[in-house]
Image (cartoon, rainbow, N blue to C red):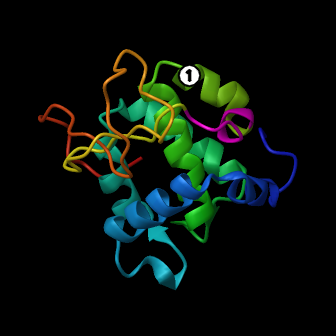
Amino acid sequence: GICRSVDSVMTLVLMLTHVEQSCYKNLFDLADPHASDGGLDQMKAASFLKKSGLPQATLHAMWNAVASCGGVRNGKLDFMGFAAYCRLVAMVQNGLATADDIKMRGFELMQREPEALANFEGLSETSSIPGSPMPGRPDSQPSLLGMPLPGGLDTGASL
């Protein structure tokens, strides 16, 4: 697998920036306000993560990478896994990784601080991390939430 041990994803949480920690916790709570019972079940996680606008195959590669690192327990995506997933989404959205990269180097990519936070459809603010403008958008304003993506995304929930 991509991870050396089930506890590997624990390191990721300790390395999250304050902005990431706050943003991903807010997004996790939005995905399922009742997720405190062990995490997001696969259907709710899939439904929320599809709002990233990424292809199904890419989302599936991310799920497998996060699951192999211990972020999915008893079929539920825990907060640590969700944060790792958000980092992978941000990497792909910013052109820094592909589904194949995630399959080969998912754990390594989870460890990198993203240039911008992940974008999810329906969250109306820009997603730059303060002090780090989005590529190609030097005028973007810092915020903790994502920016709307084009509509028409598949609404099915399976990963």
Left/right of residue 36 with respect to residue 70 in the rendered view: left
Query: Residue 83's image quarter?
Result: bottom right
Q: How many marks?
A: 1
Query: Residue 93's image quarter?
Result: top left
Q: Please state the extent of the stretch shown in magenta in the rendering.
A: 108-114
Residue 134: percent from left, percent from top: 41, 26
Left/right of residue 73 with respect to residue 128 in the rendered view: right
Does residue 15 lie above or below 130 as drawn? below
Residue 71: percent from left, percent from top: 64, 59
Pick the front one: 143 or 86: 143
Q: Which residue sits at x=80%, y=44%?
A: 3
Q: Which residue sits at x=45%, y=57%?
A: 23
Does residue 137 lie above or below 21 as drawn? above
Q: Residues within 10 Å of mark 1 (few under 14, many from 20)?
A: some
Does residue 66 lie above or below 147 as drawn? below
Residue 154: percent from left, percent from top: 20, 39
Does residue 134 lie above or below 80 as drawn? above
Query: Is any part of residue 107 visible from this angle?
Result: yes
Left/right of residue 157 with respect to residue 152 in the rendered view: right
Q: Amino acid at mark 1?
A: Ala
Looking at this rendering, what residue extends furthest in the left direction? 152
Looking at this rendering, what residue extends furthest in the top direction? 136
Query: Residue 14's image quarter?
Result: bottom right
Pick the front one: 104 or 12: 12
Q: Is residue 158 on the magenta stretch?
A: no
Q: Quadrant of the N terminus?
A: top right
Mark 1 — residue?
Answer: 97
SS for dot 1: loop
Q: Which residue sits at x=67%, y=33%?
A: 109
